[in-house]
């Protein structure tokens, strides 16, 4: 390889450089810098700062706000993920069948996903308003009485979950719909000739064929559960008493309200580790699926 | 019971009814917001069928906050981000697909880290970086962390690799330069990938909130999402008719685009999602 080869290499590097600069500059480098700064204490008045090892992480563990946020986030994921997935599957099965008005139904399910989370938050703020909100009218009608959904520690987190489920299920529906439409009608016909019950057909044929979609949708929903906190910022600011705080919201608060950058850095790394585990899980599961093909 | 159920068996009718109830329940939050937005404030939460319809809330909301400016900011932000992403991803995607250079595979793997860790969760450090660059509170600042898109590079690289190299060779024989071949052969043959990526990215950045919230700090940079959040959560006295009207107004362009290009949007999401 002579100088011409070197020139070609230089050309290739030039093509890659701009994109690589931005990705490294705002993803890889910040990640590394966050990791490093999570091991240091910032110099503040009275303290010199310097390398502190895992002290920032130990401080995190003793911070009730952090513990609550992580705990909330795990519950939040454990509920929003399966509920969204099941609802999305039901929606798809419903609108895939030849029923009257299915275009309208599909739109009703899908429209929330095209709204910004902030618009969804505003709509649900109204929906949840004590006395005026539709939810409160229903509960009063049912004789349960007034509930301040966003202001009560018992209901604030479930209220956030409902918002997330409403926003994302319709998005997952389109993936199920596409998968359902890929199931050869021959299978259905054969089953029908054999006199197989619908439920049996669903359990033994449809559900396994939807497997890869379920896997993809589950991972996406799990990532959303840890990466989307717009509604928390808008509707409850994590309150009352941290009842609806999630991990990324904790990071946001530590970084931009308390200006406690060491804590924010350590909490960010915890979030990164969780996302890394989700990615590893996805690779492991998808990797196995590839062998089937 | 055999599977070939007759057209209107009771079970089927019950199933359809259940589906409709489900659909109606799902639409309720949006319908309630629409109701409040198109009636005078007095009727916002009163279900009086004969209550007068009005568009005054929209007009009033539009003037109650600088929504025109917010719209402009969002359009500029989205245009800047998506255009930048497409250009950078085209160049890099081509190099990764068709050129040999030392360190290529290692670099590619390092860039793919972004598929797992989005810049949006590294907001504390990115805020420091953008401030250090002196770009805080500018419109480009809201897009810069996203300009290099691992997803875009990945998708275009995949697509570029499927383009027959005979086409490339033919163009080369005609004396086409590298960039010329990229522009005349590769880009036109990847149109559907660009559409899919651009639509997904537009939907993402039009709706993005947390990063713009921390990095924008004035009317002249704030995008719609941040403006709407400020408008929807005032310190006192929420006027629901105005808030719902503003919410619908700010969601309208993307909703309209979606209704017109429904198929393209759905196809794009499917394509980007299932890989």
Image (spheres, grey):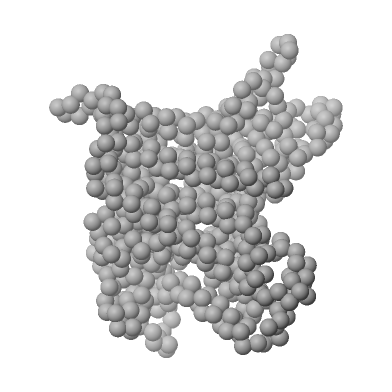
| Percent coordinates x, y for residue A39 in the rendering | 32, 29
At 81% from the left and 28% from the top, the residue drawn is B172
**In the image, is A79 to the left or to the right of B7?**
left
The picture places residue A111, in percent across and down from the top left corner, at 53, 66
Q: At 73% from the left edge and 12% from the top edge, which residue is drawn? A: A1
Residue B7's place in the image compared with A17, above or below, is below
Residue A129 showing in the rendered view: yes
Left or right of A44 on screen, residue B106: right
As drawn, A204 above or below A289: below
> Dividing the picture into quarters, in which one does residue B55 lie?
bottom left
Q: Using residue B198 as the reference point, say whether residue A231 is left or right of it.
A: left
Residue located farthest toward the top when viewing the structure as drawn: A2
* Residue farthest left in this picture: A46
Query: Residue A188 sits in which quadrant?
Result: bottom right
Residue name at image x 39 percent, y 48 percent: B210
Depicted A53 relative to depicted A108: above or below: above
Q: Nearer the viewer, residue A80 or B171?
A: A80
Question: Residue B116: x and y, percent?
Answer: 51, 41
Residue at screen point 62% across, 63% down: A207
Q: Let me know if residue B206 appears in the view.
A: no
Q: In this rendered view, identify the residue nearer to me: A236 or A194.
A: A194
């Amino acid at each position: 390889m002579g100088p011409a080869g070197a020139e070609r290499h230089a050309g290739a590097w030039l093509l890659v450089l701009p994109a690589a600069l931005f990705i490294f500059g705002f993803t890889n480098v910040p990640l590394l810098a966050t990791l490093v700064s999570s091991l240091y204490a910032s110099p503040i008045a009275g303290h010199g700062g310097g390398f502190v090892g895992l002290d920032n992480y130990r401080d995190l563990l003793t911070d009730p706000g952090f513990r609550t946020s992580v705990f909330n986030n795990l519950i939040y994921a454990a509920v929003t993920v399966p509920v969204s997935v099941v609802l999305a599957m039901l929606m798809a099965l419903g609108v895939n069948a030849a029923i009257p008005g299915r275009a309208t139904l599909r739109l009703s399910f899908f429209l929330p996903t095209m709204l910004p989370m902030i618009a969804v938050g505003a709509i649900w703020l109204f929906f949840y308003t004590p006395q005026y909100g539709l939810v409160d009218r229903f509960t009063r009608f049912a004789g349960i009485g007034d509930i301040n959904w966003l202001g009560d520690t018992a209901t604030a987190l479930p209220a956030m979950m409902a918002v997330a489920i409403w926003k994302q299920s319709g998005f997952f529906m389109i993936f199920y719909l596409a998968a359902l439409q890929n199931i050869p009608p021959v299978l259905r016909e054969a089953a029908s000739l054999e006199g197989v019950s619908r439920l049996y057909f669903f359990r033994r044929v449809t559900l396994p064929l939807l497997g890869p979609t379920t896997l993809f949708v589950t991972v996406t929903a799990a990532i959303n559960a840890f990466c989307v906190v717009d509604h928390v910022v808008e509707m409850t600011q994590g309150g009352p008493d941290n009842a609806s705080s999630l991990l990324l919201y904790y990071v946001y608060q530590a970084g931009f309200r308390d200006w406690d950058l060491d804590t924010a850095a350590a909490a960010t790394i915890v979030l990164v580790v969780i996302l890394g585990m989700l990615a590893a899980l996805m690779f492991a599961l998808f990797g196995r699926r590839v062998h089937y093909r | 019971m055999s599977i070939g159920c007759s057209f209107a068996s009771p079970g089927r009718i019950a199933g359809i009814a259940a589906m409709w109830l489900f659909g109606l329940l799902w639409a309720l939050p949006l319908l309630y917001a629409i109701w409040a937005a198109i009636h005078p404030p007095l009727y916002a939460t009163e279900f009086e069928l004969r209550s007068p319809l009005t568009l005054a809330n929209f007009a009033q909301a539009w003037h109650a906050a600088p929504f025109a400016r917010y719209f402009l900011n969002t359009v500029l932000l989205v245009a800047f981000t998506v255009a930048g992403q497409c250009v950078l991803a085209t160049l890099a995607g081509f190099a990764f697909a068709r050129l040999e250079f030392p360190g290529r595979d290692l670099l590619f793997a390092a860039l793919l880290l972004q598929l797992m860790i989005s810049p949006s969760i590294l907001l504390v450090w990115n805020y420091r970086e953008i401030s250090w660059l002196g770009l805080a509170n500018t419109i480009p600042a809201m897009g810069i962390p996203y300009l290099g898109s691992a997803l875009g590079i990945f998708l275009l690289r995949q697509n570029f690799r499927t383009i027959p190299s005979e086409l490339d060779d033919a163009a080369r024989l005609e004396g086409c330069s590298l960039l010329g071949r990229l522009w005349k052969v590769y880009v036109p043959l990847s149109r559907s990938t660009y559409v899919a990526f651009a639509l997904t990215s537009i939907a993402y950045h039009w709706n993005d909130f947390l990063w713009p919230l921390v990095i924008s700090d004035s009317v002249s940079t704030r995008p719609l999402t941040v403006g709407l959040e400020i408008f929807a959560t005032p310190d006192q006295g929420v006027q629901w008719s105005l808030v719902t009207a503003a919410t619908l107004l700010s969601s309208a362009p993307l909703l309209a685009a979606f209704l017109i290009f429904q198929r393209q949007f759905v196809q794009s999401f499917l394509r980007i999602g299932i890989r």
